[in-house]
Image (spheres, rainbow, N blue to C red):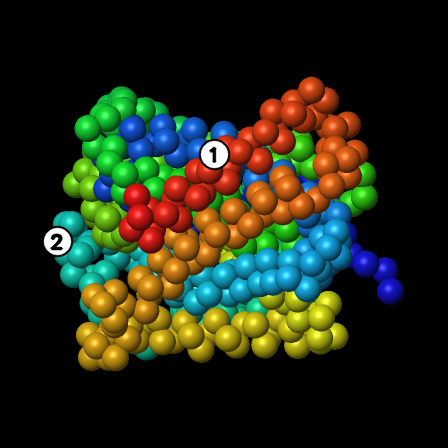
Amino acid sequence: MKIARFSRIGFILAAAGSAVGLGNIWKFPYITGEYGGGAFVLVYLITVALIGFSLMIAEMLIGYKGRKDTVTSFETLAPRHKNLWKYAGFQSLAGLLIMTFYSVVIGWIFNYIVTSLTHLPSSVKEAEVTFGAMLHSDFATQLFYHTLAFVIVSYIVSRGIKSGIEKLNDYLMPALILILTGMFLYALTLDSFGKAFAFMFAPDWSKLNSEAFVAAVGHAFFTLSLGMGAIMTYAASMEKGSNIVSSALWVVFLDTTIALVAGLMLFTFLYQYGSGPDKGPGLVFISMPAAFYEMGTLGNFFAVIFFSALAFAGLTSAVSLVEPTVQYLIDRFGLTRTKAAWVSGFFFYVVGILVILSNIEMTKEYFTWDGKNLFDWIDFLTAAVMLPLGGLVMSIFVGYILPKNEVEATLRPFMKGYFNIWYFSLRYIAPFALFIVILNLLGVV
Ligand code: PFF
């Protein structure tokens, strides 16, 4: 059987499609708003440059050399203790867990595309009520759109790397970039652009506490799709001889640029038409629709294309969240791709329903522990615990366990003298920073 592989540009688009997601357009702007702007953005950018880029190369390297699902890749590459190292591969289950709420949020976005066609809330207050009503009492609508997201994602993954995932990204990524560029150019013409720029880039150090620091590091991981095998699984289908380093650079560059462009655009709109930047997770679902309303008829058009761009970003990431488990089921249990895709889909679909219920007024008490509902627990467990842990394990594996000469033989041709800097950062800087993040989580520092 011929094994389907990404084309060179197909791989970059798919990996960038994985990285550019709800994290860039929904999460990044609102956490930047919550943590006060500039200083937070700076820590995030430094983390991306110093740690994110190094780990992106490391994760691609494991997949590229391993050529299989994450469990098998760790197992075959480990020079000894194979049985132990294979457990590192189970980091890929985090993707399926993330998918349980990611699919629900994509569902909200679908709903907003449809309703924005005809109606926008005339004030932030009304927008708040609309969003709250959907979240807390409209089970049927959320279920309907969550089901739609589940069917689309599972179908695309079932079509495989080449005719499913690569094709999806070939269409949606350029469309996403086009829409964001158009909206950004429009934002450039508005008076408030300067204010938005100052908010994002003028650091106010007094706002930077340890919580903001950890959030910035955690987000750098989440947004780059690192630490849970998505990039690794895609890299297993790279063409032999591909340039890992330039691919990693492209993915990091696209992800970061799109986050900054989306943030600047959103904050400009919010300063110009809306309520400012500090609205929390409701930012794109509450403040933005109200801001679009202020733009008149053009607002409906902008709202529809904005939520479409958000849906595109979400879908291209969603397939990468499911693919590691699918590949695992295929490689280890011999399932057909179709079966593997629908079995994995079924898991996130069912747990996703519980996630919806954990927000619904009538049922939420059954899904809330310690003040956090199921949605928040899964978000916390994956983004704050599993991803940094996955990153730590990966940096140790490539930095200390894989024989240096093997790593060097693969990467040196693409890196030349920079190899030593990368290796140093992977061995010392990345594990140290991740270790601090994990200690902080445990409440030790
Ligand atoms: N990077 C995606 C985002 O920013 O929304 C989320 C994500 C996708 C995280 C895939 C992890 C992953 F493996």
Q: Which amino acid, by three-letter code, is at mark 2?
A: Lys
- Residue 257 appearing in the image: yes
Compare residues 348 and 182 and report the one nearer the observer: 348
* Mark closer to the chain start, 1 or 2: 1
Judged from the image, the secondary structure of the residue bearing numbered disc 2 is helix
Question: Where is mark 2, residue-wise?
Answer: 125
Is residue 329 shown above or below 58? below
Q: Which amino acid, by three-letter code, is at mark 1?
A: Val
Q: Quadrant of residue 113?
A: bottom left
- Residue 254 appearing in the image: no
Q: Quadrant of residue 332?
A: bottom right
Question: Where is mark 1, residue-wise?
Answer: 48
Q: Is mark 2 within 8 Å of ligand 1?
A: no
Q: Where residue 407 appears, x then y in whole percent?
A: 73, 38
Q: Which residue appears at 24% of the width and 36% of the height?
A: 209
Other-residue count near label 2 (Cα within 10 Å), few / some / many at <14 / 14–19 / ≥20: few
Compare residues 76 and 410 and report the one nearer the observer: 76
Could you tell whether 30 is left or right of 257 in the image?
A: left
Q: Is mark 1 within 8 Å of ligand 1?
A: no
